[in-house]
Image (cartoon, helix red, strand yellow):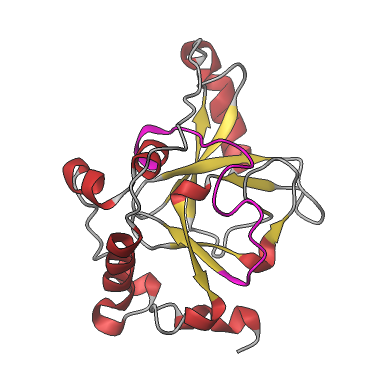
Amino acid sequence: MRTQMKKWYLFTVFAGFAGLTAIVAPVSGEADQENTMENVLVTVAQSGGLSWTDKHANYVKPSKAELKKILSKLQYDVTQKDSTERPFKNEYWDNKKEGIYVDIVSGEPLFSSKDKFKSGTGWPSFTRPIVTDALVEKADFSIFGIRTELRSTLADSHVGHLFEDGPAPSGLRYCINSASLKFIPKEMLAAKGYGEFESIFGK
């Protein structure tokens, strides 16, 4: 996919290179909507007892008005307006617990703690997604130069960017906003409807 992206960049760079600036969302003054999001994630994850692959085709993304009620302002700005949260002042940048990270909007599994590493950037960083088709890569011209934006496949949430300065063997760094994620501890995977991922942690 990255080879195709690079070809596409060459075709569009002159048309798309604009002097836009990245938006940095505030981190203070947000309402705690943990309980609401918990209900949404459990409902999506456990509907019909299906695997995540089976549930993808049945998902309907909430409207903007509904998302504003479900998400905090920061979560909405990051996932729906492509904003970027502050480094070192976000929920998961230094989280060392074992589990998986899912899309805050849809509950779609995106990353595993097994692939998380300390990048020193102040944002959660991973070497790869939990499944190969969990993310969509898009060209991002919002700042000087071209970056690879990462969006969730199911809900089209903006989650972060992909860089080629990660550790071996992939050399990739998935730089992700905590506000786009929900962490599911490994001991809660089955209860939250993510039992199929327990094998990652030796269960």
Q: Is residue 84 magenta?
A: yes
Tell me the chief SS of the magenta region: loop
Quarter assignment of residue 60: bottom left
- Pick out the residue farthest to the right: 168
- Pick out the residue farthest to the front: 29
- Pick out the residue farthest to the bottom: 203
Q: Is residue 171 magenta?
A: no
Whether residue 124 sits left or right of residue 156 in the image: it is: right
The residue located at (55%, 17%) in the rendering is 13
Whether residue 29 sits left or right of residue 176 in the image: it is: left
Tell me: residue 134, above or below residue 68. below
Horizontal and vertical percent for residue 120? Answer: 75, 43
* Image quadrant where one finds the C terminus: bottom right
Horizontal and vertical percent for residue 81? Answer: 37, 33
The residue located at (40%, 40%) in the rendering is 74
Horizontal and vertical percent for residue 10? Answer: 59, 21
The residue located at (82%, 54%) in the rendering is 168
* Image quadrant where one finds the N terminus: top right
Foreground residue among 63 and 121? 121
Foreground residue among 182 and 138? 182
Whether residue 175 sits left or right of residue 29 in the image: it is: right
Foreground residue among 55 and 143? 143
Foreground residue among 172 and 126? 126
Tell me: residue 132, above or below residue 179. below
How many callouts does the rendering have? 0
Question: What range is drawn magenta here?
Answer: 79-99
Tell me: residue 40, above or below residue 82. below
Horizontal and vertical percent for residue 84? Answer: 50, 34
The residue located at (43%, 50%) in the rendering is 152
